[in-house]
């Protein structure tokens, strides 16, 4: 039991540090690094959710009372985010300062634009070659990024932490 408690404390500290990498000032001038941290946080959350569905991961019932929810919102700036699970940490991103999240939103929108341009270019190439293709068979770039596996990398990151 003691070992499990220590391990859980280490996981909570890791979750808090990733949260601070995303929302803190350490990488304020390097939004690309903040994006990597945000993507990692999201992947870890999705892995944790998948594990909890199979019964091998942590399962926490998300039923906070209204009073508890209110106290979390008020005390967030004092005590930090709830780090019991990656899902809680991700949910607490909305409580971070908007000025710290705007660069992340800008980077996400830039990535969507790049994917849209690639898709448009591929469509022009396909249409230029005379090949007929049904539009429903062409994936939407937003759906691609949402449905990708939490352990699938975009090529520039490695999944070096197993949860």
Image (cartoon, rainbow, N blue to C red):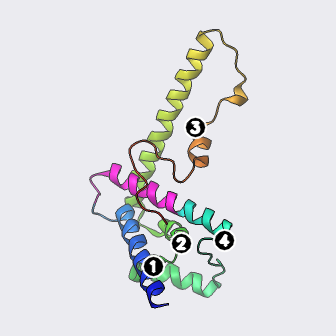
- Residue under the point 59% across and 75% down: 58
Which of the two discs, 1 and 2, labels the residue nearer the N terminus? 1
Which percent across, then down, holds residue 112?
50, 39
Front-most of 124 and 75? Answer: 124
- Determine the secondary structure under disc 2: helix
Tell me which corner region of the image, top left, top right, bottom left or bottom right, holds residue 40.
bottom left
Q: Nearer the viewer, mark 4 or mark 2?
A: 4
- Residue occupied by mark 2: 88
Which of the two discs, 3 and 4, labels the residue nearer the N terminus? 4
Q: Which residues are magenta?
A: 27-44
- Residue occupied by mark 3: 141
In 3D space, how far apart are the residues under numbered discs 1 and 2 (Cα atoms)? 12 Å
Question: Magenta stretch mostly in which secondary structure?
Answer: helix
Q: Nearer the viewer, mark 3 or mark 4?
A: 4
- Residue occupied by mark 4: 55
- Residue occupied by mark 1: 76
Q: Residue 113 vs residue 56: left or right?
A: left
In 3D space, how far apart are the residues under numbered discs 3 and 4 (Cα atoms)? 31 Å
Q: Is residue 29 magenta?
A: yes
Disc 4, disc 2: CB below 8 Å? Answer: no
């Amino acid at each position: 039991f003691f070992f499990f408690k220590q391990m859980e404390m280490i996981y909570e500290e890791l979750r808090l540090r990733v949260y601070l990498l995303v929302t803190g000032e350490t990488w304020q001038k390097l939004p690309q690094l903040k994006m990597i941290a945000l993507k990692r946080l999201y992947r870890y959350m999705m892995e944790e959710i998948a594990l909890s569905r199979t019964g091998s991961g942590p399962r926490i019932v998300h039923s906070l009372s209204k009073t508890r929810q209110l106290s979390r919102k008020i005390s967030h700036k004092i005590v930090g985010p709830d780090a019991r699970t990656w899902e809680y940490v991700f949910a607490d991103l909305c409580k971070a300062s908007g000025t710290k999240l705007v660069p992340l939103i800008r980077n996400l929108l830039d990535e969507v634009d790049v994917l849209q341009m690639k898709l448009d270019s591929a469509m022009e190439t396909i249409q230029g070659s005379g090949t007929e293709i049904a539009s429903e068979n062409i994936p939407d770039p937003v759906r691609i990024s949402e449905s990708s596996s939490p352990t699938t990398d975009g090529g520039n990151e490695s999944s070096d932490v197993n949860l």
